[in-house]
Amino acid sequence: MNRICELLGIEYPIIQGGMAWVATAELAAAVSNAGGLGLIAAGGAPADVVREQIKKARTLTDKPFGVNVMLMSPFSDEVMEVVIEEKPAVVATGAGNPGKYIERLKEAGIKIMPVIASVAMAKRMEKAGADAVIAEGTEAGGHIGELTTMVLTPQVVDAVSIPVVSAGGYADSRGTKAAFALGADGIQVGTRFICSTECIAHENYKNAVLKAKDRDAVVTGRSTGAPVRALKNKLTKEYQRLEKEGASAEEIEELGVGGLRRAFQDGDIENGSLMAGQSAAMVHEIQPCAEIVKDYFKDVEF
Ligand SMILES: O=C(O)COc1ccc(-c2c[nH]c(CNC(=O)Nc3ncc(Sc4ccccn4)s3)n2)cc1
């Protein structure tokens, strides 16, 4: 039995990435109904919004689903309180160290799967009691680490004995086979699910992903210590100009605030932050989640 399927009680060892603004209850429920594990993104939302999303997901699926808590959010403490009360099957975390929450999450019977971008962090999370780790390579969209999926995954597999989910750059079943060859127990996918029928991202955002070419998912913010991968547009060019001129972190941050909302809600594909990973160039159609999940496991033994 596949260790991720066993741990989470799911049919396919695929997790939908908890992308801020993009991963709503509708998307998470669709992926869970398709046999994977859907994650509701807490993103930067306040606790009551997350509670309402969990309740909504419960009306849309009776399969396991989770919540992805972005630890850079100013609301992360109160969001975690709601998660401990509402008890979704799983909590994934991003952009930080969930160590201080792990004991109470375990007491609540919730599985914990932190995203990590280094071997040291993977070891720290195993020691802290995580049930699995999501090793995310720099190919991923959004806030990223420096190591590629190809070298991070096998090193994390060698470093910990808990199940490893590999994330970053997975676009089709060739990637799934590669992930298993690298020793992973499952994969996490974000970008391709933006182009799912059930995702409520603006059509312009989805079309920008469909149009992306191999080098269009660029990184900004390395100079401020918060590297973020998004599709090349006026905003990323402005970011890169400021960074080249040695602008302050505040000036650069200022540019990014509201970037995700402008892209996701307003469909402003020039001034919005079109967060997406390098797999965008391999996404060619908008499909229902059920078709996407099946495609990742076409002719794949697990
Ligand atoms: O050492 C520590 O304390 C923590 O170390 C870590 C360092 C990095 C990570 C990490 C890397 N990737 C992830 C999971 N992915 C993400 O968290 N991706 C994200 N995308 C958009 C986000 S919201 C945002 C908006 C503007 C600027 C930055 N972020 S968060 N976590 C996790 C832990």
Image: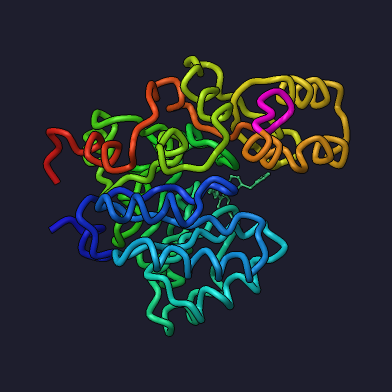
Q: Is residue 31 magenta?
A: no
| The quarter of the displayed image where residue 183 is located | top left
Q: Which residue is drawn at 41% across and 32% down?
A: 169
Instruction: Judge left or right: residue 98 versus residue 152.
Output: right
| The quarter of the displayed image where residue 282 is located | top left
Q: Which residue lies furthest to the bottom in this view?
A: 107
Q: Which residue is drawn at 40% across and 37% down?
A: 196
Q: Which residue is drawn at 49% across and 36% down?
A: 140
- In the depicted structure, whether residue 39 falls above or below residue 293: below
Relative image position of residue 276 (x, y in whole percent): 53, 33
Please tell me which residue lies in front, 163 or 80. 80
Task: Give the residues in magenta.
Answer: 267-273
Q: Total number of numbered labels?
A: 0
Please tell me which residue lies in front, 109 or 30. 30
Instruction: Judge left or right: residue 264 versus residue 176.
Output: right
Relative image position of residue 242 (x, y in whole percent): 83, 25
- In the depicted structure, whether residue 286 falls above or below residue 120: above
Q: Main secondary structure of the magenta part?
A: loop
- Name the image quarter holding the N terminus: bottom left
- In the depicted structure, whether residue 79 falls above or below residue 27: below
Q: Residue at x 34, y 33 (%)?
A: 287
Please tell me which residue lies in front, 269 or 90. 269
Relative image position of residue 41 (x, y in whole percent): 53, 55
- In the depicted structure, whether residue 120 falls above or below residue 100: above
Instruction: Judge left or right: residue 204 versus residue 233.
Output: left
Please tell me which residue lies in front, 235 or 288. 288
Relative image position of residue 119 (x, y in whole percent): 45, 50
Colour mapping: rainbow
